[in-house]
């Protein structure tokens, strides 16, 4: 434990006896945790998290859709957020035995009413002309990947 503290931090000065006193006080307040500590439950949970993330990555990689994971979070195209949530629920059910709850700060376009004015306005904005630099980078990407970048159809977002 002491290794995690920077030089000069009070945590570096704690002796084993002092740490034992702190642990005993903690367990006195939280006796239900006694049998859970120091049993590698964190490692087991990280493994489950990794299996769920592998499931999510495989699902989207099979479709050629980029998805990035950062710990237990995912970054994905805003038209695929609802799909991501469904895949995460499917993966957690298969790996952990229950569909785990998800939380996100923003909702994806596939979770919106396609007839809503703000959604139509956004789609119109996304379809505005792009700069020469953008078009050149997009053409290079298409050539490199062999896949065209196509504008999405708002009517297909919910499918």
Image: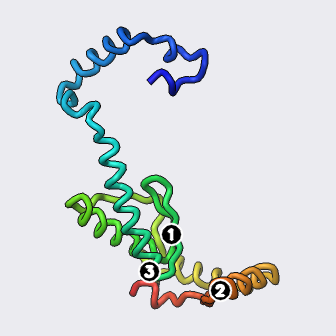
Q: Which mark is residue 62?
A: 3
Q: Which of marks 2 and 1 is in front?
A: 1
Across and down, in percent, residue 5 comes to 53, 24
Q: Which of marks 2 and 1 is nearer the N terminus?
A: 1
- Residue shown at the point (20%, 27%) measured from the top left: 34
Quadrant placement of the N terminus: top left
Question: Is residue 13 rendered to the left or right of residue 143?
Answer: left
Q: What element carries label 1?
A: strand
Numbered badge on residue 127: 2
Exactly how many numbered labels are in the figure?
Answer: 3
Residue annotated with mark 1: 67
Residue depicted at 44% across the width and 78% down the height: 110
Q: Do the residues labelled 3 and 2 touch (CB within 8 Å)?
A: no
Q: What element carries label 2?
A: loop
Residue 27 x %, y %: 24, 21
Label 2 – label 1 distance at C-alpha:
23 Å
Foreground: disc 1 or disc 3: 3
Q: How is the image coloured?
A: rainbow
- Marks 3/2: CA–CA distance: 27 Å
Label 3 residue SS: helix
Instruction: Work out whether mark 1 precedes mark 3 in sequence or the reverse, and give the earlier one.
Output: 3
Q: Is residue 94 left or right of residue 77?
A: left
């Amino acid at each position: 434990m002491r290794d995690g503290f920077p030089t000069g931090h009070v945590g570096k000065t704690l002796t084993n006896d002092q740490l034992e006193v702190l642990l005993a006080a903690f367990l006195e307040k939280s006796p239900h945790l006694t049998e859970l500590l120091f049993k590698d439950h964190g490692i087991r949970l990280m493994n489950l998290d990794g299996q769920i993330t592998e499931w999510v990555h495989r699902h989207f990689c099979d479709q050629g859709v980029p998805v990035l994971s950062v710990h237990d979070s995912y970054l994905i195209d805003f038209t695929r957020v609802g799909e991501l949530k469904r895949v995460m629920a499917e993966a957690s059910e298969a790996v952990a035995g229950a569909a785990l709850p998800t939380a996100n700060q923003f909702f994806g376009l596939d979770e919106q009413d396609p007839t809503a004015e703000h959604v139509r306005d956004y789609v119109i904005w996304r379809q505005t002309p792009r700069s020469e630099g953008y078009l050149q980078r997009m053409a290079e990407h298409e050539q490199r990947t062999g896949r065209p970048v196509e504008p999405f159809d708002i009517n297909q977002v919910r499918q």
